[in-house]
Image: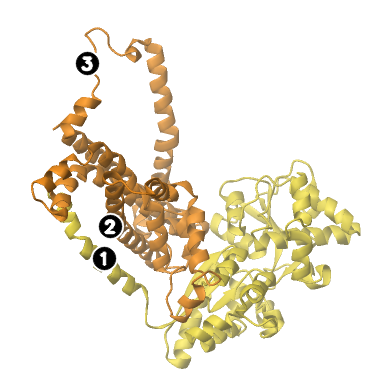
Chain colours: A orange, B yellow
Amino acid sequence: MASTIASTLVVHPAPAGATPRATHDPAWVRWTLTAVALLFLLFFLVLPLAAVFTEALRRGVGAYFAAFRDLDALASIRLTLLAAVIAVPSNIVFGVAAAWLIAKFQFRGKSLLTTLIDLPFAVSPVISGLIYVLVFGLQGWFGEWLLDHDIKIIFAVPGIVLATTFVTFPFVARELIPLMQAQGADEEYAAITLGANGWQTFWRVTLPNIKWGLLYGVILCNARAMGEFGAVSVVSGHIRGETNTMPLHVEILYNEYNFVAAFAVASLLALLAIVTLVLKAFVEWRYAQSRRA
Amino acid sequence: MKTLLHHLMKFIPFFLLLGAGLAATVSGKTIELLNVSYDPTRELYADFNQVFSSYWKAKTGDDVVIKQSHGGSGKQARSVIDGLQADVVTLALAADIDALYANAKLIPADWQKRLPQNSTPYTSTIVFLVRKGNPKAIKDWDDLVKPGVGVITPNPKTSGGARWNYLAAWAYAKHKLGSDAAAKAFVTTLYQNVPVLDSGARGSTTTFAQREIGDVAITWENEAFLVLKEFGADNFEIVVPSLSILAEPPVTVVDKVAARKGTADVAKAYLQYLYSDEGQDIAGRNYYRPRSAKASAKYAKIFPQLQLVTIDAEFGGWTKAQKTHFADGGIFDQIYLKK
């Protein structure tokens, strides 16, 4: 299957000598373009990243690690991990289900569903947070009821998890829908014809076909889940040691003139991002390989 | 590699369990109070909470853990209205606490009469922070409207401190020039000198001290002292104007929340302890002007005497000042739009 797609996608090799036009451009054009791209990277990526680590280590390694011994910092790390650990698996389940539905079945309202999945990308994260305040806040629809039953949603951990899940919702589905659509349902039909039931088809045919796309979506989803600021800030209530995630804790430390600790926690987030990028590169490489196979 | 995903999937229940376990450890067992406060009080309450905890432990044997939440005063009030479970609020100005009554009936209308001195255990005022050596020779409000002077002050729409700043400037101009029209012109010119309006007092001081923008920051007195402490007294100077405003950041128990959580007594004791000798001393140590004669005398050297006007006498109270100056279409909107 994958190989048939590959063969339809690959343009017939051009005759020898007729290489793509871009390589014919004069050397100075190529060099200028490369220089522009590199300079851009330097100023917008490398320098800020270097600044984060320089600021974090300004008072030495001791001060750097002291930042992580603070109880509030540990609580914020724990909360960020907790939010990601709940949001990412939920989004795997929802994302796979939604992509499967959209790619393999025809039904009324399909384009509406596709649009709804994109909603969290379309609205500002602040609005995403405010939605929850309007629904679960004391002045909101369920506020009184929740209070009477002693259930805390916003300004507590569940609200943070909800907001994180909401803003990261599209990543897995968005990654899978085009992939599954390109693959079509032929292999599933074949499996069913051969006597496989629904679960068997899913586990043995669908899932192996999408695994690298899925993993890629999971990595992006995780990166956003850990780094989200806006939506989480709105529903957090900023209770120290309780409802501050890492990005919120960075802001607090910065506001307390505690620059070394602020940048130390920021550097941890940056490290997570770098690990994510490495994983992403690896997955992309494996993904390309699996498609070539 | 085919089985990698299967393995991951198998871990989902484990992840969920782990999540539930972590969530369970977040909620403690001792008495917990939540103090929702504004930006500059971080250091004050970090100090005070420790002292109160040991006082309460000695008195009743109960452990009390006080959690803090800080942010712009207006924003914090909004969060409490939306359900942030604050046992006590300690905000920048009475109008923000009034909102808890007006919008959600969380407290009675006469909340400000429940504790001494308008429920304000400490006061502050508005002063100027300049760079070392005072290169622009700033001495009083008049120097802030001179051309070429960069003035840093936060946005009065979102920041409680910024409203005090604005009103202090207005009061000075009115006392000196005599009319509201002249005061409006004065304040208009002043805001034309403001290159950036941050959303909160702390953001504004960071802009001035860390990012080194502007020649003078209008700020809380306690905030100015904190900058001297954090950034070194050899980098900045405090300039006290001839006239300023008496800023009264009040405190109150949020009755509905405390009653529901069964913390009304501790919450009340917590705020009353702010008026004790120890509480007043902590306020002074953190550069808030204490109310008690004893602590005032002790810290008299730190806090210079100046003419202080009050919001009630000068502006007819917060509700009126808010409506005239800061509501949508109010005077601030008019003068800032002109820019």
Q: Dot 3, crowdedness within 10 Å: few (<14), some or many (≥20)?
A: few
Left or right: where A27 falls relative to A205: right
Q: In front: B78, or A33?
A: B78
Q: Nearer the viewer, mark 1 or mark 3?
A: 3
Q: In front: B321, or B122?
A: B321
Q: Write down the quadrant of residue A240 in the picture.
A: bottom left
In the image, residue A153 sits, relative to residue A108, either above or below, namely below
Disc 3 marks a residue whose amino acid type is: Pro
List the single residue furthest toward the bottom: B60
Please determine if labels 1 and 3 lie on a single subunit.
no
Numbered disc 1: what chain? Answer: B
Q: In front: B47, or A227?
A: A227
Residue A237 marker? none
Q: Write down the quadrant of residue B11 in the picture.
A: bottom left
Q: CA distance from mark 1 to mark 3?
A: 50 Å
Residue denoted by label 3:
A13
List the single residue furthest toward the left: A194
Residue denoted by label 2:
A89
Q: Quadrant of the N terminus of chain B?
A: top left
List the single residue furthest toward the right: B178
Left or right: where A162 falls relative to A85: right
Q: Position of residue B248 (x, y in %)?
A: 70, 72
Q: Position of residue B262 (x, y in %)?
A: 48, 87
Q: In front: B119, or B226?
A: B119
Disc 2 marks a residue whose amino acid type is: Pro
Whether residues under marks 2 and 1 lie with C-beta atoms below 8 angstroms apart, the answer is yes
Please determine if labels 3 and 2 lie on a single subunit.
yes
Q: CA distance from mark 2 to mark 1?
A: 9 Å
Whether residue B143 is visible, yes or no, is no
Circle 1 sits in a helix, a strand or a loop, which is it? helix
Circle 3 sits in a helix, a strand or a loop, which is it? loop
Residue denoted by label 1:
B16
